[in-house]
Image: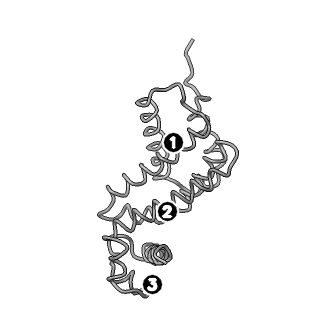
Amino acid sequence: MAVDTKESIAKAAKKLLLQKGVRRLTVKEIVEECRITRQTFYYHFEDIPALVRWMLEQDTARTVQQVETLESGQEKLRYLFAVAVQGLPYVKKGMQSSYRAELEQLLSRQIQQLFEQICDAEGLFQDCTRFEFELILRYHSQAVLGLLQNWSEADTKNLDQIVRVVFRLMTGKILPRRES
């Protein structure tokens, strides 16, 4: 029952988030939207940032579960991009709030964890030290966040091509040209 209540709270928060943005989102509005008491909200979440963190963790867990069913690394990366693009309206609203720094850290960490799981499943970067591997993960997660920050309709139309290029970059199949 607790997970259902948490999901109901999250669903209400997502709806209100798109309407109001995180800065103006209040516990009062969330509890009214999902018809629970403030005590129920605070039983499940310490505050709104804790709710946002839980929502990201749940979305990441669902994404990882789905990614594990896909065959190739490129399919997995495409799925991650598709999920991220679908979540952009929520993220953009969150970035306009006082929670921006915390949200950026959470997103970066979640993307890094997803990439780590993909790299492990694909056997990528096995010859690297742990330091090198973590640096590579940070680099790629920040690169993807950078792409998503300026995402456009044209990017959505070219999603497959973008995924192909990013995957080739990640797997070392695109290298700088050498001048002769």
Mark 3 touching mark 1, by CB under 8 A?
A: no
Residue at 39 percent of width and 54 percent of height? 106
Instruction: Find the residue positioned furthest to the left.
Output: 98
Does residue 121 appear to the left or right of 110 in the view shown?
right
Please state which amino acid type lies under the numbered disc 1. Answer: Glu
Answer with mark 3 or mark 2, whichever residue precedes in sequence.
3
Instruction: Count neighbours of disc 1 (C-alpha within 10 A) and say few if under 14, some if 14 to 19, many if 20 or more.
Output: some
Does residue 168 appear to the left or right of 90 in the view shown?
right
CA–CA distance in space, label 2 to label 1:
17 Å
Answer with mark 3 or mark 1, whichever residue precedes in sequence.
3
Above-or-below relation of 12 to 179: below
Instruction: Find the residue positioned furthest to the top.
Output: 180
**Mark 1 lies on residue:** 116
Residue at 57 percent of width and 43 percent of height? 118
Give x and y (percent) for residue 101. 32, 55
**Mark 2 lies on residue:** 58
CA–CA distance in space, label 3 to label 1:
36 Å
Please state which amino acid type lies under the numbered disc 3. Answer: Cys
Q: Can you tell which mark lies on residue 34?
A: 3
Please state which amino acid type lies under the numbered disc 2. Answer: Gln
Give x and y (percent) for residue 154. 60, 54
Q: Quadrant of residue 6?
A: bottom left
Give x and y (percent) for residue 66. 62, 56
**SS at circle 2:** helix
Above-or-below relation of 108 to 26: above
Q: Nearer the viewer, residue 106 or 150?
A: 106
Answer with mark 2 or mark 1, whichever residue precedes in sequence.
2
Q: Indicate the quadrant containing the C terminus: top left, top right, bottom left or bottom right.
A: top right
**SS at circle 3:** helix
Give x and y (percent) for residue 55. 45, 65
Q: Quadrant of residue 71?
A: top right
